[in-house]
Image (cartoon, rainbow, N blue to C red):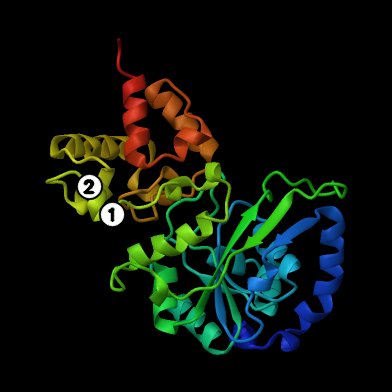
Amino acid sequence: MTVFAGTPLLPEERLWLWRFGFPIVRALAAFLAPWRLEGGENIPRTGGYILVANHINWKDPPWIEFALGHAIRYMGKRELFETPVIGFLLRAIGAFPVRRGEVDRGALQMALNVVAAGQPLGFFAEGHRSESGQLIRGHPGVAYVAKRSGASLVPLAVIGTKRARLGAFWRRDILIRVGEPFRASDLAVQADDSQAVTDAIMRRVAALMPEEQRGVYRTAPSTAADLPTGVKRADVAKFNIGDQRQSDVAREQVGEFLKAIIPSEERPYLVTDLATVFDVTSLTADEIAERCLQKYGVRPSEADLALPLWQLAKKLGAKNTPN
């Protein structure tokens, strides 16, 4: 597929398949699953920018393009590009592959090249779809691209794609909400802390979403003035517990939970401090809930699974403790 090697860098008018097919597909999509767009005026008219969005359903990437009316250069999981027809179509419309669960330097460099070429880059910083519909913690690749490129970041919230039914043309279940552009240098966090920069970016996305869907970004980060005397920020960031003994217990519970429910070979993603179960694996909510039922005797709800791992492990452990 070397013929498509530079496709993501091409201007929209040179993406021939997208140019001729998009109007037809967009009109069909508008009939099958209409959308509402809020904040469309926040999309830059010229130059490259990074569109950072949440990800809850397969409809998210195309419906964002339908709503904005522009070709967004997305990175997608490499497995999709290995399928002949799908891979051909994705490359032809400007998408490019990324290896999930690891740092893919080639994909990050292509992302930088896309922005440098003046094209819009679509970035789902969570790394995979959120089965619960709630925001999961973003991966630091978006911070890397934002800092290295200096490009504008445009937060975007996709709401309703999971429940939207194709063919229900009388309803407008899908809402695309666009926030004001900003740059990584505008964020009040340490520039050399990529995860902190990522979290600050994701909070801009969370602010556009209903509170119940903000997940790990539902609450604002604590400031130093908010912390109890003697408690370090690092301790609070770990498990939101100041007491060292309780933190150690929480770490042990998380370790036992992961060992029992998600073995290391099914854990391609890094276990970070505020990670939910969906941050560390691509298993579905039903698969995880069924394993919890077998292990703990209780089936956690999707709201339970959206909790940080230490809270989920603690909750399941408590439910499994005899009175």
Question: Circle 2 sits on which residue?
Answer: 227
Check the picture and name the quadrant holding the C terminus.
top left
**Element marked by disc 2:** loop
Residue 10: percent from the left, percent from the top? 65, 88
Q: Residue at x 67, y 70 (%)?
A: 84
The residue carrying mark 1 is: 223
Residue at screen point 79% across, 50% down: 172
Image quarter where the N terminus lies is bottom right
Does 127 sit left or right of 20 as displayed?
left
Residue 121 - label: none
Taking the image as shown, residue 318 lies to the left or right of residue 251, namely right
Residue occupying the point 55% across, 57% down: 54
Residue 257 is left or right of residue 13, and the answer is left
Cα distance in 3D space between marks 2 and 1: 7 Å
Decide if residue 298 is on the left or right side of residue 175. left
Say few, some or many: other residues with alpha carbon within 10 Å of mark 1 (under 14 / 14 to 19 / 20 or more). few
Check disc 2 and give the amino acid type.
Leu
Amino acid type of the residue that numbered disc 1 sits on in the rendered structure: Thr
Q: Is residue 13 above or below residue 90?
A: below
Residue lying at the far left of the rendered structure: 230
Mark 1: secondary structure = loop
Q: Residue furthest front?
A: 225
Identify the image quadrant of residue 150: bottom left
| Circles 2, 1 touching at the beta carbon (< 8 Å) | yes
Which of the 4 quarters of the picture holds residue 314?
A: top left
Say which of 138 and 85 sits in front: 138
Instruction: Mark yes or no: residue 2 visible.
Output: no
| 41, 68: nearer the viewer | 41
Provide residue 14's location: percent of width, then percent of height: 73, 89
Where is residue 224 shown, x and y percent of the image? 23, 54
Question: Does residue 30 show up?
Answer: yes
